Image (tube, helix red, strand yellow):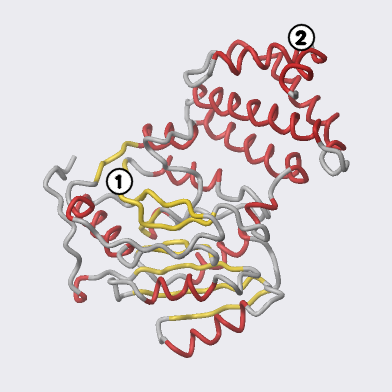
Amino acid sequence: MKDISHFYYKGIEPERQPLVTVAISCYDVEKYISRCIESVLAQTYSNLDILILDDGSRDRTGNICDYYKTQDSRIRVVHQSNQGPGTARNYLLDMAFGDFIAFLDGDDYVEKYIYEYMVSAILETQCPLAICKYYENKEEDPVKRYQLTEDMRANRLRIITRDELITGLIEESDELPVRSMVWNKLYHRSILEERRFPGVMFYEDKLFTLQVLGDVEEAVFIDTPLYHYIIDRKEGLRTQAGFFCIFSEWLPSLRDARNYLCSIGREDLAWSQDYLKYKQLLDYYSEAKRDKLGDKSKYLPDITAEIEKCKDSFDKIYGCRIADPKEKKRMQKFLEHRWTYDHFYLR
């Protein structure tokens, strides 16, 4: 393993910069897409292939993208009918020119040194994958950009093994925020050649990221936030994902991930994922139970039936490494005394 204890990010001379494709997918983000593109154009790293896919936007997003194409020769713009983020990202992968590939959502933005920092980390460690921390911003927050401090430049790298990466992803570790999202990562194109996203609207990146992590021996983690993730945009796909896709997309994505974990001998993590799944299902149950309009309460019978499936493997699920005894007690109350559960937990 390469010694990175003396790493100091200084940047990369233009003549040594490998080509990076920044793959931007966007849909109905006319209020945000300029901010996104301009954050890429402001990069300290110049050797960029900026590939933008307008996924059938109904607003002015496509026109704005076309305008920026006239302003910088590095920008390519593709328009297609709306097919969802999974299909859009597959198209971007097929069209990417870069030695490295980064994904960026059209309503988010990045620090001006993100790609130079991530490429530097990869070249320093010879890892095929870099992962960075990120900021979580609200929609109404003003644009925030940060200067690199001496502390941010020095010794902020960790080399993470495959097992650590997969464990951090499944257990949703705050200490190692790998996450399933693709936008806080920089990929060497070689690890993506055999990988494509499921063609679904939501949760398209869970299995994709899990399989990518399973393909690498190690990755470099940058303990510096470099990406700005907008967490609460009301019109965004992330916000729309919820009750109506619990059974059509969320649970199937977890089932696919579980099958993969078992196939690589990580049944322990499969039980951890099940634990988090049932924790979320109880939250969905509570939300549906409180619903007065009927949009969510109509899912109650199916949610209840899904939760009750945990009876068959209760001890393994609530015996996993990350299980909280309070959550175990909560589930026991739900399974044994539904009226008491509703009265105690839904007050």
Residue 235 in sight from this viewpoint: yes
User: Which image quarter: residue 227?
Assistant: bottom left
**Looking at numbered disc 1 in the image, what kind of residue is underneath it?**
Asp
Labels 1 and 2 touching (C-beta < 8 A)? no
Q: Which mark is residue 187?
A: none
Secondary structure of the residue carrying tag 2 is: helix
> In the image shown, does 309 or 98 lie closer to the viewer?
309
Image: 233 above or below 320: below
> In the image shown, does 135 or 250 lie closer to the viewer?
135
Residue 101 in sight from this viewpoint: no
- Residue at 17 percent across and 55 percent down: it is 150
**Looking at numbered disc 2 in the image, what kind of residue is underneath it?**
Glu
Image: 218 above or below 150: above
Secondary structure of the residue carrying tag 1 is: strand
Drawn side of residue 246 relative to residue 53, left or right: right
User: Which image quarter: residue 297?
Assistant: top right
Q: Which mark is residue 223?
A: 1
The residue that label 2 is drawn on is 336
Image: 338 above or below 74: above
Residue 86 image point, x, y percent? 61, 57
The quadrant the N terminus occupies is top left
Residue 317 image point, x, y percent? 59, 18
- Residue at 60 percent across and 26 percent down: it is 274
